[in-house]
Amino acid sequence: MAVEQIRISEAQALQVISTPEGQFADVKAIEIAPASLTKTIAAFANADGGELFIGIEEFGEGKVRRWRGFENQEAANGHVGLFERLFPLGTDFHYEFLESPSHPGLVLHIDINKTQDIMRASNQIAYIRRGASKLPVESPEAIRRLEYSKGISSFETELTNVPITVISESEVVANFIEQVVPTSTPEAWLKKQTLIREDRPSVAGVLLFADEPQASLPKRCGIKVYRYKTKEAEGFRGALAFDPETVEGSLYDQIHSAVKTTTEHTERVPKLGEDALETIKYPPETLHEIITNAVLHRDYSVADDVHIRIFDNRIEVQSPGKLPAHVTVKNILYERFARNGALVRILNKFPNPPNKDVGEGLNTAFAAMHDLGLKEPVIRELENAVLVTIKHEPLASPEEAIMDYLATHDTIKNAQARAVTHIRADYQVKIIFGRMVDKGLIEQVPGTRTSNTAYRKVSKPAPDEDDFGQMKLI
């Protein structure tokens, strides 16, 4: 398959040359052996994804960079051929050549997404990106950890060393059987669901049906709730309102108790209103869905609890483990992947299940924030955890949201404006556009009309038309 060749500007070429090497990007000279580069590509794919530019070399003691690409596409056949065999073009890997009129040769740009499967280099070893380094993943234990992290394997299927009576004779399973499958017996039903195998309960079985899963799986399935009387970026001991509370029990009870506890503490947080102190309100759907999501989709192979931190101006929910498979913070609202399939499926069988709309929880949480006029939650992936921050901050005005969009995009249309302002009616956005035009903030793009009408920021003359800050690599 032919690789696309794209012509870029001088400013964009300078951006490529100065690409910082780190967790998400790397640059290499054309002399680097293709087999060596497969390690870098595999490392990006097994971690968070990234970009690789081949044709940028460093020289001299100061390691000054310069663009020196392939003479033509044929000169890169050895690289492209090997890469496409190991990492074929498609959803996860994209290849293109970049040419610049003022620099010699073609730079091969490889855009690598986080993959669902473990990717291996040409030496059949898997690697993972850590900062600017690529680390081999060779031992069976390391491969197993990577499988857990990517969601290929799930710790929920592992067998525990506790008696089957811990789940077959618990109060939780007795109540469940009576309400959901009264024609069966606990042990028979648990075996049918493969929650008991080889006369041992699985991790999922203990989490769902043990009265006290924390006794069988210590430091793997609790929830810690903290209340910090501060707005600082980090909580500290002096700001703790009380010793952290631990929420335990089966997952069903744990989720409902954690939501209740978080809500109660949050409603005691004071906020200055127009006439007096008021209580802070968060949408109950948001707290419920985000806590449920943290408990259901965490990596139970990581020996840590879920942490809920209540600040004066926000709530943080931190769940152990990286996002699984191909899920990233950018696509998490529309991609679907259940790391713990049995937990999700069976918890949904409980009366009034916490995960009623399977796969739609985060969308519900975000929509509830919008409906209350608050900014949507922020999702970050830490080194070995996922952190969701629910800020108690009002949404930006429609005009601010449109100008924020235009800070990183050349133009905006009605549909795009409705998306960023959360306004459903197109006529309302037209009125806002009109006001912004009258104020001299934006202008209609010449030649656009009807449904294709686009607007841009009012251009201001500048002494230098090459505004590097606004350039984007194609």
Image (cartoon, rainbow, N blue to C red):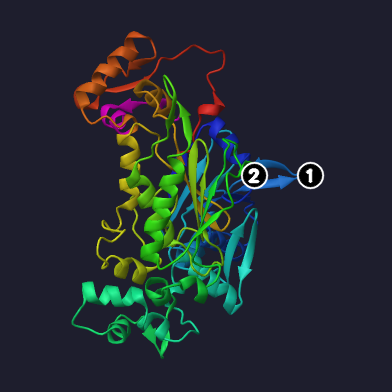
The residue carrying pointer 1 sits among few (fewer than 14), some (14 to 19) or many (20 or more) residues within 10 Å by Cα, namely few
Above-or-below relation of 86 to 238: below
| Residue 155 vs residue 244, the one in the foreground | 244
Does the stretch in magenta take in 409? yes
In the rendered image, which residue does mark 1 sit on? 60
Q: Magenta stretch?
A: 406-419
Q: Residue at left 49%, top 34%?
A: 472
The residue type indicated by label 2 comes to Phe
Residue 80 x, y percent position in the rendering: 50, 59
The quadrant of the rendering that contains the C terminus is top left
The quadrant of the rendering that contains the N terminus is bottom left
Q: Earlier in the sequence, mark 1 or mark 2?
A: 1
Q: Residue at left 50%, top 46%?
A: 316
Q: Is 124 situated left or right of 251 in this image?
A: right
* Residue 410 can be seen in this image: no
Residue 132 x, y percent position in the rendering: 65, 53
Q: Please name which of the two marks, 1 or 2, marks the residue nearer to the observer.
A: 2
Residue 351 x, y percent position in the rendering: 24, 64
Above-or-below relation of 292 to 406: below
In the rendered image, which residue does mark 2 sit on? 236
How far is the residue under mark 1 from the one under mark 2? 47 Å
Contact, mark 1 vs mark 2 (Cβ under 8 Å)? no
Does the stretch in magenta take in 416? yes
Mark 1 lies on a secondary structure that is loop
The residue carrying pointer 2 sits among few (fewer than 14), some (14 to 19) or many (20 or more) residues within 10 Å by Cα, namely few
Mark 2 lies on a secondary structure that is loop
The residue type indicated by label 1 comes to Gly
Residue 86 x, y percent position in the rendering: 48, 67
